[in-house]
Image (cartoon, coloured by chain):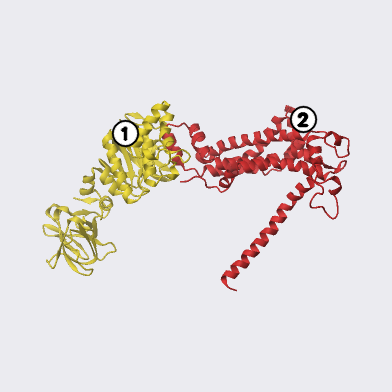
Chain colours: A yellow, B red
Amino acid sequence: MARIELVNLTKTFGSVVAVKDLSFVIDDGEFVVFVGPSGCGKTTTLRMIAGFEDPSAGEIRIDGRVVNDVEPRDRGLGMVFQTHALFPHKNVAQNIEFGLRMKRIAANERQKRVRDVAEMVRIAHLLDKMPAQCSGGESQRVALARTLVTNPSTFLLDEPLSSLDAKLRRELRAECDRLHQTLKRTFIFVTHDQEEAMTLADRIVVMREGEIEQVGSPMQIYADPVSYFVADFFGSPSMNLVAGEIVREGEGARFRASRFDIPLPPRFKAVPAGRATLGIRPEHVGVRRGHNGSTELPVRLVEPLGKDTLLYFDDGTARAFVAVSEGFDMAEVKPGDRIALSFDPERLYLFREDGKRIG
Amino acid sequence: MTKSRRRRVSTAIRYAVLTLWAIIAFFPIYWMVATSFKPDTQWFAWPPVYFPEPPTLDNYRNVWFGAEQYAATQYAISSQKPLISLGNSAIIATTSTLLAVLFGSVIAYGVSRHRILSETRMFQLLMLRMIPPIVVVAPLSLYYAAVGLTDTFAGLILIYFLTSLPYAVWMTKSFIDEVPREIEQAAQILGASRWRTIFEIVLPLIRSGLVATFLFILILTWSEYLLALIITKTQVTTVPIELSKYQGSTEGRVYGRQAALSVGITIPLMIVGLIIRKHLARGFSFGMVRR
């Protein structure tokens, strides 16, 4: 069991600041996902926790003990790498057994534990194979098994699924979830995939340029993004973000852009006029054929997905404005048709020019 | 000319050039083997004798086993015993090569992973090897005489080890660079110490490279002449020194014996090469770790 504290953690490589004054506490048994674009410092943070990078400043504490100077092998952690990092010259059983051998566990006990864990992640049939004979998904299961068998207090997972295809990714994602539920250990998972973050995390840490942009549960992050960056990063299809300006109109305010003119709900009545970005998620955009006097846009592309239909509108920018319509109601719409849009006033977001959320 | 015809012609030319080259390259080896089986009357014969007639083992018997009936002839010039020299060479070359590869790979690991030597230092290390041995051999022999290393196994092993260390570091480093760091880190976080990681993970992964390095250095030390000539006398002669004795102002040119000796010196290297050829192909292709 482990509670991990990061205190004013900073890491610089030459003049590049990879992680900037990061403070964060990961509770015992929590599943925390660090997410962000490449270069945001999430992997560096994980590697500092593992002990492969020395922090330039700040402290890492595991269960209250400062571990900055503790070797990786003495931190009681387990790590799964993006590249699996199996030992190519050892077979699967020997790979899994390695950690137990290092801990000087007796041979018969080792065998038993290797078999148990192999069954747990369903690779018992692979034990005699060499890593080169395993597929990508199998290799990652072996890597998981190799970590599991040593019974670490915390699992560090560095983009473990990113080298797999979509189906395997979903499958192993479920596997990670299941393991977390059964083992009740601390999981720290790094990914650039917002969907993985949303589905796995108890808490998501969104990182950007070496700093924490937002921390919260998946629903908080999704429904209550603190900035343009977070709003844009989460959700698929991502949030519609329209650049325009806020104009005051008597007691209230309106948002205007080249093809939009939307009255803002009362909670925005105090916002100052000026340039801003309006955000609304595709599922909160209502679509109706025919004219209703509000915003109306031509359709650029229709994507019937079965359960839903995605409509891409031409809003005069390179990035299409997207709406989701349930079922096939809109599947017959042709590119070029004009469709009336409505916006759920409770689900409108406004962002300042510097990217911070307004209101 | 049609395309297929042009391709046939160019193939023919390529084979012709390669065949010619192969003849040029292999002829001396053939000549060495053929001469070693020639009776003394055919060594200098003109027109040259390409196939010994009749082939004889006298040269081998004489140089390698100092057969009694030849001892009194003018060609029985060796006061040494070539078999002992061969043994000396085997001990000296393999020991110094093993030491060089072992220490070289550990240093190379340090350079590759922890930059214990800067790039400049690495080049300086290689430059050490660029110093002509003839420059250092005289001072070295003075020191050797002073500390009693002249004409000893330890003396020759030490100097061969030191002079081949730069090669060993450079070659093994290029192999270690190929091993993904994450594999080592996986071992570390699973509880392996640094030494354990090197000896159980890194070195086994580059074993083809180590074998290639081993053979490369073995060939150099096996055939090293100058240092051996100066710092050994009569107690620890190596085979290249032995070879030189069959061609001198007093002995004349004892080609048949020399060829028989040369064949004997070459065979051990060929045997080593054959045993490890599986590794050589991979080692010299510099890319053996599957990512």
Q: Quadrant of residue A296?
A: bottom left
- Viewport quadrant of the N terminus of chain A: top left
Residue A340: x %, y % from top left? 15, 65
Element under label 2?
loop
Q: Residue A170 carries which label?
A: none
On the image, the x and y values in percent for residue B33 come to: 75, 47
- Label 2 and label 1: CA atoms lie apart by 67 Å
Q: Which amino acid does label 1 sit on?
A: Ile
Residue A6 as seen in the image, left or right of residue B248: left
Q: How many labels does the image show?
A: 2
Q: What residue type is labelled 2?
A: Gln
Residue A215 x, y percent position in the rendering: 26, 43
Task: Work out whether residue A270 can be spotted.
Answer: no
Residue placed most toward the observer, A205 or B100: B100
Q: Where is residue A308 in the image (x, y as percent from the top left)?
A: 20, 57
Quarter of the rendering containing residue A317: bottom left
The lab-note entry on whether marks 2 and 1 share a chain reads no
Closest to the observer, B30 or A281: B30
Q: Residues within 10 Å of mark 2 (few under 14, many from 20)?
A: some
Q: Mark 1 lies on which chain?
A: A
Q: Are the two marked residues, 2 and 1, in contact with CB atoms closer than 8 angstroms?
A: no
Left or right of residue A77, residue B54 in this image: right
Which is more toward the observer, A246 or A170?
A170
Disc 1: CA contacts within 10 A as few (<14), some (14-19) or many (>=20):
many
Mark whose residue sits in front, 2 or 1: 2
Q: To which residue does mark 2 refer?
A: B235
Q: Quadrant of residue B95?
A: top right
> Is B108 in front, or is B68?
B68
Residue for badge 1: A4
